Image: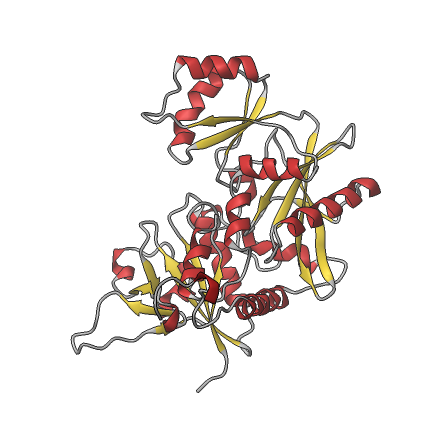
Amino acid sequence: MSSKKRVAVFFGGISPEHDISVISGLQALHAIDTVKYNPFPVYISRDGTWFVGEQLFDKSCYIPDVAMCKKLTPVRLSLDPKDKGVLFPVHKSVFGSSKHYTVDIALPVFHGRIGEDGSIQGVFETAGVPYAGMRAMASSIFMDKDVTKSLLKSINVPHLGCHVVKKPIEGLLLRSREIEQIKSAVKFPVCIKPAHMGSSIGVSRISNIDELIAVLPRIFTYDNKVILEPFVDNAYELNISVRNGPEGIVTSAIEKPLRHSDLLDFKQKYLSENGKNGVKTASSQGMISLTREVNPAIDSHVEQQIRSWACQVFDVVDGTGAPRIDFIADAQSNEVWLNEVNPTPGSLAFFLWEQAATLTTFTQLLDDLLTEAVMLFDGSSTHEDPVPLEARILKR
């Protein structure tokens, strides 16, 4: 019997960021230390079906077509904690028995809703499965940009204010009353963002109310809430990752994404003119093919603020995992605002740790996150009867 823990790497899912999750998940799958762990992929299709199979190790199999799916095994996770993390095949064999797949540690590598937002984390907690990354509460908070701003306000971390627009109860078009409210409350131009999505999907500059009315129906097909932020003309981005170290919270290198338009959109982040189908998956720089400057020459005070605020936000939610925290800075005034927190960043932002003051390889980063997962799980174990004596009403 092998003593190596079986690590299930979960990716895909029903999020608009499904494809990005596949790329990140495969990168993590192939970077895990196979001397210490037995990693295997669990792919969740766009319709929500969970699959396992050797073919899923090969990036050329994505997205699996109908013929490929017939070679894979659909599975379901037992929610009974006594099973201690078992994936059972959905269909039993003709002989009445079926192979099951043990999950010692789960590594969720989802981006966007239904995965990065605390939902899958809650499933793992219910099933009694140790999992890496941010906990359910923190994931849920940070995957809602509106709620994140409320948290930032409570701890006095600078951020841009916003106006929230919610999807109508019926249909996709705003009512005249809602339009008038926006006109009176919002000064254009603004930056529009889906509240629960990342990867710059749906993000754009809006010059007037007519443009806003035109783009909202499409965004509402992906998200039920958007935020409108003031548009900063001289803005540039600075991103940093943060995690727990042996002696406290540590921060990664800082990256400054370089862009060619007013906003760093989805295609600039994830598509390249050179690679097959435009998608670059180089292991050394993560999946993002945009030109970036790592450890850029920035004002020392700006750098100090970014590192301090990143640690503060991570600490206030009892942070775990290695989220990436994105900031916006004004090139003229050097004013800085925290933009958003990504609980599960693209490529797990490993390239920022490879170029940190203390180098951490992708393999070591994953080992640290998996070790943390086990420690958190062991520290949260309950008594055989979770109900304390003074709260027991029913007979035992």
Tell me residue 246's x, y (percent).
Answer: 71, 66
- Residue 258 appears anywhere in the view: no
Q: Position of residue 378 (x, y in %)?
A: 54, 71
Identify the image quadrant of the N terminus.
bottom left
Q: Is residue 95 left or right of residue 361?
A: left
Tell me: residue 196, above or below residue 213.
below
Residue 186 location (% of width, % of height): 57, 18
Q: Position of residue 346 (x, y in %)?
A: 55, 51
Q: Quadrant of residue 235?
A: top right
What is the quadrant of residue 360 in the picture?
A: bottom right
In-front residue for pair 197/29 = 197
Q: Is residue 17 above or below residue 201?
A: below
* In the rendered image, the vertical position of residue 218 relative to residue 155, given as above or below: above
Image quarter hosting the C terminus = bottom left
Residue drawn at the location 55% of the way across and 79% of the way down: 35
What residue is drawn where x is 21% and y is 71%?
Answer: 92
* Residue 356 in view in this figure: yes
Q: Residue at x 31, y 56 (%)?
A: 49
59 left or right, relative to 329: left
